[in-house]
Image (cartoon, helix red, strand yellow):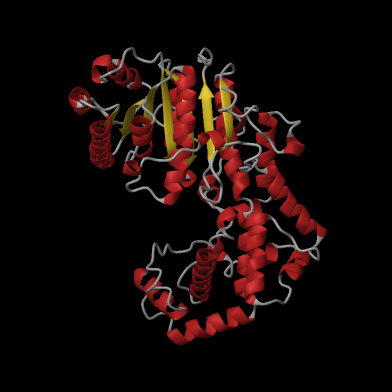
Amino acid sequence: MSQFLPPTELPLPSHLEHLSPTEYLSHLVEIADKYNEFTSLHIVHFLSRNFWDMIDPEWQQALMEPESEDEFIDDMLNLASRYECKSSWPESLKAYVEEMKTTQLPSFDPEQFNTDHLSCTIDRHLLSGMSEKKAHEVETLSMLIKHVAEATDMTSIIDLGAGQGYLSRMLALQHGLHVLGVDADEIQTCGAKFFQGKAEKSIKGKKIRALVATEEDPTEAIAKEKERQSHLNHVTQMITLENIPTLLADWTDTSRWNYREVPAKSWMICGLHTCGDLAPTIIRLFQGSPEIGGMISVGCCYHWLTEEKDAQGTYHFPMSTTLIDRGYKLGPTLRMLACQAPGRWETQREATVKSFKHNFYRTMLQKIMVDKGLATIKVAPVVGRMNHKRDFASFPVYVKAALRRFDLSGTITDEEAIEFEAKARQDGQYRKMIILWTLRIMLSPIIESIILVDRWVYLKDTLPNAKICMWPLFDKVASPRNVVIAALKEGTNPIH
């Protein structure tokens, strides 16, 4: 199975390979703490709290060198996405950039993490509803699951957090695995069943047409195909360590799966972009359930992670005793920072520049409100989601729309808004905000690495004899949350 999983269970940055995973986790935390001023700030307070002053004056001068707007934006996008520095920049700034680049978990590298064996062509009947990004993820992850499942005889799959069933359908209808899709939301389950029905009808029709075209007397084969039961079932249930044995026992019954000779010896639990607490839940279900021998999971949505003990007295973050014993917390600001995708800034230039503009509007509004006594310097009122086309047409339009939400209409005039924006831009505040934002966003992969390595260390501490691999499976630009954890308990060695 070496061709399916990387040779190193937890690949570390090359200059940090002398560290143990636990030592590496502690090192990541030290880096995050070292730059706490950057990580803990909210950009909305940039002007009202004068965050520009926290940047080294030498860095300020270098990054504010006179150049066109397009050239400046290019510099910032290249810095965030490529870690590119100008030769004229201070050595201390270059050192910061290098530290951010080389401390995080290794990014996707086709030469180091070969994915050639994970490519396939998704049946067009399964593509319904999939974006290009989702198709890339489903194709790659489903092939990894297929290879590992067949090599270990774990061909019974539980897809937890199955949602609309994209991964489940691929595993069952194209790869022939027996899949139980589970979601806590009945609406999602209904959607998955609807798409499953459409796909199965189309695929059966295709097979029957092929039989008619190739068989001299296809009657018996057609009848058998029409009677063939699905390899895929969906249920709505909130899964816990207490109820999963019953669920899996029910679905290990061969009578539920037609054309199945024997049940697989154990289950594999999987998830694609398991949101928030669902990723650590899958890890704990794998760790604590004898019926589950394998796990393959890609997490996401770190901002939805909870950091307090749940009803069972367990944490979703941190999970490892390394961080629990030191009372380590990220907090909502750092969890949100972990969700950012600086690697996409360059390829999504228009969206990135639009985001700069929107956040500059918000920080200008906060400064005016503080100056006029409409808000405190400590707490920024929450504007909420706004209409990108209508509400951001200009700064005065934005101010009006935001003030309506605060029941403060008329407290800031159009003239005041226009005058403030002109002065702020003249003072270079737009570029200054972008510079701080860029320097801060470069810490995003460090925070994400803390969350991911914490999960790996937890698994290795609690299952020391298990094979636990964690590596970047998807291209980070195509899919920013690209790290997969694949784990096999002792005794689930390849059967061939």
Q: In this view, does 378 lie above or below 140?
A: below
Q: Is residue 201 above or below residue 79?
A: above
The spot of residue 178 in percent (x, y) is: 34, 24
**Residue 306 seen in the figure:** no
Between 482 and 185, the one lying in front of the other is 482
Q: In this view, does 165 lie above or below 349?
A: above
**Residue 441 seen in the figure:** yes
Q: Is residue 391 above or below residue 184?
A: below
**At 63% across and 45% down in the image, what residue appears?**
446
**At 57% across and 21% down in the image, what residue appears?**
467
Between 280 and 172, the one lying in front of the other is 172
Quadrant (top left, top right, bottom left, bottom right) of the N terminus: top right
The spot of residue 83 in percent (x, y) is: 69, 55
Relative horizontal placement of residue 306, taking residue 456 as reference (left or right) = left
Relative horizontal placement of residue 156, taking residue 331 as reference (left or right) = left
**At 28% across and 15% down in the image, what residue appears?**
254
Residue furthest to the bottom: 415
**At 60% across and 79% down in the image, what residue appears?**
425
Quarter residue 394 falls in: bottom left
Quarter residue 257 falls in: top left
The spot of residue 217 in percent (x, y) is: 20, 25
The spot of residue 132 in percent (x, y) is: 43, 50
Quarter residue 252 falls in: top left
Between 52 and 219, the one lying in front of the other is 219
